[in-house]
Amino acid sequence: CLLGMAVGDAMGYSVDKKSWSEICEAYGPNGLLGYDLANGSADVTSYTQLAVFVCNSLLLASTRGNPELYSRYLVLAVREWAKSQQFRANPERTHCWVAQVGSLRRRLCMDTQMLDALTRPTLGTPEAPVFRSVSPGSLTGALAVGLCHDPKRMQTSQLLRLGTEAVAFTHGRPEAFLCGAFLSCAMAMLLQDPQQPLYPLFTAAMDTVAEVYADRYPTDTEKLSQLIQKALSMTRDPELSPLVAMTLLECTTAAECVAGAVYAATIHPANFDEAMIVSVNHSGRSCAVGALTGAFLGARLGDEALPDFYLESLECAPHLRELAQDLVDCRQVSRIFDDSWDQKYVQGLPTG
């Protein structure tokens, strides 16, 4: 999941917000077909950075053995990520060890309004929004919530709540933070059964969100549900080209980017490379759609399905693998108390 997210993020960064005609002018009639490398390295942006900070911080909460701390540690995660975007020669003492990794703290924020929101004394909540934005900047934080989900420690209602909070800190419109509930739920369901078909999985995730939030946010829940179903129905239209489908979905707002990722992942559920090409070649937020699509297919297919040429240029790949292994090991209590774990999740220091 983390590796796929980083690949989609880095690939989409080259064409983010460019029109389709601009993409064709730069890369040819078929658009971008792989990384556009800078100095031989594929850089990740705030989409991957935010997700790894959330994973790191929720591991801190799990280490302390109290699920009630998750909301508090979500705040810690986004605050520390925002601090990591400031110019400092040497990072100050942090709780998250990923803040000490240069490739995960480079100043590549794709939504600068987020930094303003996260440096304010009070962060937004679904009930008391600070910024009523609908952009996709904080969606990957909700994906990370789903990635950290352990059914034995976290109820579905808490999972959905954390997913909405991860987005509402900075993006306070219901149509944005309901996407957080959908993403956290879909990722948690996918990890429980990676081989299940994506069409019914995404439908079930949206149904779960609607059961919880339709009474409170009827219009926005219905709007998101219709977008998800529109994206899914497009995958069953053999006459519809991926470019036309992505153009129809627009992929500009948070909900549209989620729908774009649902389409790209579902149309190529077994081919990571083809899904990546679909996810970034359009006139919308290529970085966001690429990151979400890569996360879904990375989780579904495993790292062995990610082509080597993507991973070889990804500077942060070893750190993402380490963090992913820690997410697995956290469910094995005996693993938590060794020196390496203590260094990362008590002292906040990387092991390398």
Image (tube, helix red, strand yellow):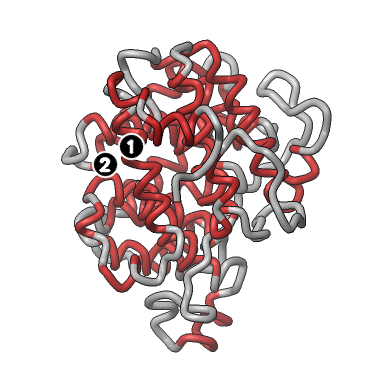
Outermost residue on the left side: it is: 195
- Answer left or right for 254 relative to 319: right
Task: Name the residue type under label 1.
Answer: Phe
Q: Residue at x 53, y 36 (%)?
A: 54
When asked about the image quadrant of residue 95, the answer is top right
Could one spot residue 340 in this view of the protein? yes
- Residue drawn at x 55%, y 35% as measured from the top left: 348
The residue located at (52%, 66%) in the rendering is 43
Q: Residues within 10 Å of mark 1 (few under 14, many from 20)?
A: many
Label 1: which residue? 202
Tell me: 308 left or right of 126.
Answer: left
Left/right placement of residue 323 relative to residue 81 reads left
Q: Secondary structure at mark 1?
A: helix
Q: Nearer the viewer, residue 270 or 90?
A: 90
Residue type pointed to by label 2? Tyr
Residue 14 in the image, given as x and y percentages of width and height: 54, 73
Judged from this view, the residue extending furthest toward the right is 121
Q: Which residue is mark 2?
A: 199
